[in-house]
Image (cartoon, grey):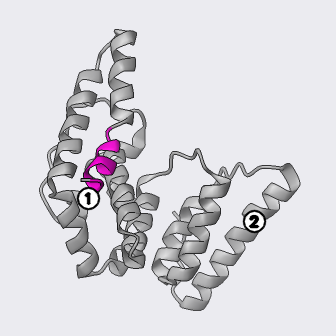
Amino acid sequence: MMIFPDTEKKLRSRISSYKSALNKEKKEYGCINDGAGKRYLLFALHFALNDLKKSGQYFEWYEKEFNDDIGEPIQKLCWAISLYRMGELDQARYQLADLMLTNLYMIPRLLGEHVEIYDIWHCNSDGDYEYFDYLYDEILTAITPDDKKWVKTEYDSFVFKRIRQRYIDIFGQLKGLDDMTLRKKLLNESYALLDQLKLSENR
């Protein structure tokens, strides 16, 4: 894991260094491969710095450069709470729901709630129970009681519960399922689950 900067000056320096490295890679090769995952670490660094203007600028850059990137849980957590702090509530809600489906355990563990280990199919290790343990202490410290109150309110909302339960049902069926036609149908349904957020916002 990255050694986390312990001062604002060091945070800004690390952010600048990582961003320069990514831009250099694009200049040299025409695209950014980022095998080291600096693009994700930058979400954590910006979150700890809590310079919302800089965070917003980075989010725009990231979405332009990595518009088809699947992301990872810690990145999504930092992104969601930062958007909440910015007052971008619809976007924040979407990112939080995306985090919830990427890792079913991270939000309840963040809130100190008991969570069962689900007997479901996982497409990669991002969904593991232990992924929460990779959260930097600096990130946990930076999450305020107000942030947690918002996270809990959304997590306990009807639409989040409905999306979460259907996701668990789908991925429970996918475990050990060999019928490729049915697998495809279930996966396609799972990809559309977050569309329920857009529908609820328009009511």
Give the farthest residue toward the right: 28
Q: Which residue is mark 2?
A: 21
Q: Is 87 left or right of 150, judged from the image as shown? A: right
Q: Is residue 6 above or below residue 153?
A: below
The prevailing secondary structure element of the residues shown in magenta is helix
Magenta range is 193-202
Which of the two labelled residues, at mark 2 and mark 1, occupies the earlier sequence position? 2
Residue contact at pointers 2 and 1, CB within 8 angstroms? no
Per the rendering, the mark at residue 15 is none
Q: Residue at x 85, y 50 (%)?
A: 29
Q: Is 81 contained in the magenta span?
A: no
Q: Nearer the viewer, residue 10 or 63?
A: 63
Q: Is 200 contained in the magenta span?
A: yes
- Tell me the distance, in whole angstroms, between the alpha carbons under discs 2 and 1: 32 Å
Q: Which residue is mark 1?
A: 107
- Amino acid on which disc 2 is placed: Ala
Q: Position of residue 129 (x, y in %)?
A: 28, 48
